[in-house]
Image (cartoon, rainbow, N blue to C red):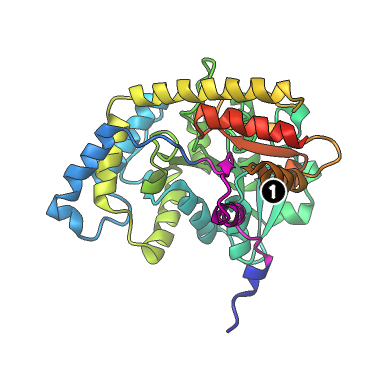
Amino acid sequence: MKHANNLNKLPPYLFAQIDAKRDALRAQGIEVISLGIGDPDLPTPTHIVDAMAEAIRDPKNHQYPDYAGSLAYRSACAEWMKRRFGVELDPANEVLALIGSKEGIAHIHTAFVNPGDFVLAPSIGYPVYSGGATLMHANTHFLPMRAESGWLAELDANDIPAEVLSRARILFLGYPNNPTGATATPEYFDEAIAFCREHDLLLVHDNAYSEISFDGYIAPSILERPGAKDVCIEMFSLSKTYNMTGWRIGFACGNPEAIRALGTVKNNLDSGQFTAIQDAAIAALAGPQDCVVEMCALYQRRRDLILDALWAIGVECEAPRATIYVWAKVPQGLTSADFAEKVLTEAHVIVTPGSGYGPDGEGYIRISLTTPDDQLLEAVRRIKETL
């Protein structure tokens, strides 16, 4: 049996590899503490679960859902965007339901990228930006990111080969950034919008972590910026904001042509998200937001806890203003993968090697804050013993 050649170019999904190693250790009876995948350890808020319980008993929700998402859900998304960012959207033409933002990011390649084309992606970012291109027999050109520049992907056309730029179709950005926790300024977003307009690119902004922020920082939407809707589509997820990772619900919004193209792909490849889940998501978006405030406070406390513990053992890291991750420097003499393997086999702690997020991630690890306080401290204690 022969599979498609592009699968040979696709590295194994990072978290699948980590899970396999974790399961092998646990099968030996070893207690493993995972600071790897960003899967919240707290349950979905009760009012959202209650809305789902009610919706799932409604017979009309047992049929095929609307491909684009129910108008009620898309309207709730538009109202949330207006309330949260002051962004006006037409729910009929500028909002599309997603089966999680990962699905939307993957499928946007199918809508805009041809074999042999390029996407431009940050050199440290969500692996699906480049993985989606590979599955389309296309290529990724990574934009450099440096600590001294605040981990902002460099948007200098002079540093991109002319042939690459002429064949580029999409620019991916994501701020607050996974995995570095970096944030972008309005001026940077304006630069990105102008860059995409000049080079006829679709700008896909991944805003999955917009609601998880600390120290008074409030993350923006790129759609707040002038002219953004002309070139931009923005992806949102309810996964981290409302502890709904397993529910698989999100939305895309912005440029109506891009929304229509992505919707055409989805019409042919999936049948939409279960309407009862959309109803629960409406309860999340339109309901009380106290749960989000409380969760940010929890993650900020954990962030401070892990930073103090890492600094105490000599691991360099900075305090992120957003996301559920800490981006930490690997001790000298070890690669990211070496260090992750060392702490897994010797300390039985999972951390994610930065190299798995792109070429400029080498030399760093990502630590997730979705672990109870006592296990975070125990994990750092174990790591200290291995150094």
Mark 1, residue position = 345
Above-or-below relation of 158 to 169: above
Q: Which residues are magenta?
A: 9-38
Front position in the image: 359 or 48:
48
Image point 56% across, 44% down: which residue?
Answer: 31
The quadrant holding residue 163 is: bottom right
Above-or-below relation of 71 to 109: above
Residue 178 lies, in percent from the top left, at 59, 38
**Residue 29: in magenta span:** yes
**Residue placed furthest toward the front:** 29
Residue 246 lies, in percent from the top left, at 39, 47
Quick check: can you spot residue 229? yes
Front position in the image: 61 or 73:
61
Quick check: 76 left or right of 172? left
Quick check: 320 left or right of 150? left
Residue 219 lies, in percent from the top left, at 51, 25
Circle 1: residue type: Thr
* Quarter of the image with the N terminus in it: bottom right
Quick check: 334 left or right of 128? right
Image point 30% across, 40% down: which residue?
Answer: 281
Front position in the image: 259 or 172:
172
Callout 1 secondary element: helix
Residue 204 lies, in percent from the top left, at 54, 44
**Residue placed furthest toward the right:** 333
Quick check: can you spot residue 320? no
**Residue 333: in magenta span:** no
**Mark 1: few/some/many CA within 10 Å (<14, 14-19, 20+):** some
> How many marks overall?
1
**Residue placed furthest toward the bottom:** 1
The quadrant holding residue 90 is: top left
